[in-house]
Image (cartoon, grey):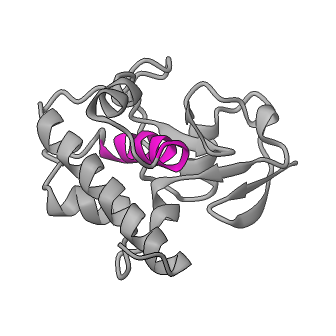
Amino acid sequence: MVSLTVNGQRHEVDAEPDTPLLYVLRDHLALNAAKFGCGLGQCGACTVMVDGVAVFSCVMPLLMLEDREVMTVEGLGTVENPGPMQRAFMEEQAAQCGYCIAGMMMRAQALLQGNPHASDADIRAALEPNLCRCGTHMRILRAVRRAATMMQSAGAETTGAVR
């Protein structure tokens, strides 16, 4: 049994220590946003955050996650109340087939949590490991910029700062 926290909820998972996190998320916890793409950490469809860092869940063994914080796109918000990143991707219609989008959102979320004022160059560099075959790159970039603005506005409202 391995203990890990996913989207703020503690889980005891009964799986082999070398089981990839992606399989634990999808098969044990029914969190299906992260996708199996290549299984080699080369496409980014499986990207989630571990302790605030974007990682390829297809190559992250369960053993490495004991007492660590995992966040998936499901942890960013709900259908009824999507988080800023999710809203921005919807508003910019950033998905075409949608297969890459959860991974793109998680990599962008990790970037903006560490660098809320990321430049276009920062965004492009952060998203480089994630592939999108549909070619919605420009809409994805607009969505990340929109999410950054939304997150900054939410922070100002929370802290009482003047916008």
* Residue farthest to the right, as pictured: 1
Taking the magenta stretch, the answer to whether it contains residue 112 is yes
Residue 20 quadrant: top right
Identity of the residue drawn at 52% across and 78% down: 158
The answer to whether residue 97 is seen in the rendering is no
Identity of the residue drawn at 57% across and 34% down: 57
* Residue farthest to the front, as pictured: 162
Q: Please indicate whether residue 143 sits to the left or right of residue 57 in the image.
A: left
Q: Considering depth in this image, is 38 or 155 the residue closer to the camera?
A: 155
The answer to whether residue 151 is seen in the rendering is yes
Q: Considering depth in this image, is 49 or 15 the residue closer to the camera?
A: 49
Q: Is residue 38 above or below residue 7?
A: above
Q: Considering depth in this image, is 16 or 110 the residue closer to the camera?
A: 110
Q: Please indicate whether residue 18 sits to the left or right of residue 140 in the image.
A: right
Residue 134 quadrant: top left
Figure quadrant of the C terminus: bottom left
- Give the magenta-colored segment's residue range: 101-115
Q: Please indicate whether residue 151 sits to the left or right of residue 9 in the image.
A: left
Residue 103, image x, y percentages: 40, 40
* Helix, strand or loop for the magenta stretch, by majority: helix
Identity of the residue drawn at 75% across and 27% down: 18
Taking the magenta stretch, the answer to whether it contains residue 90 is no
Residue 110, image x, y percentages: 51, 43
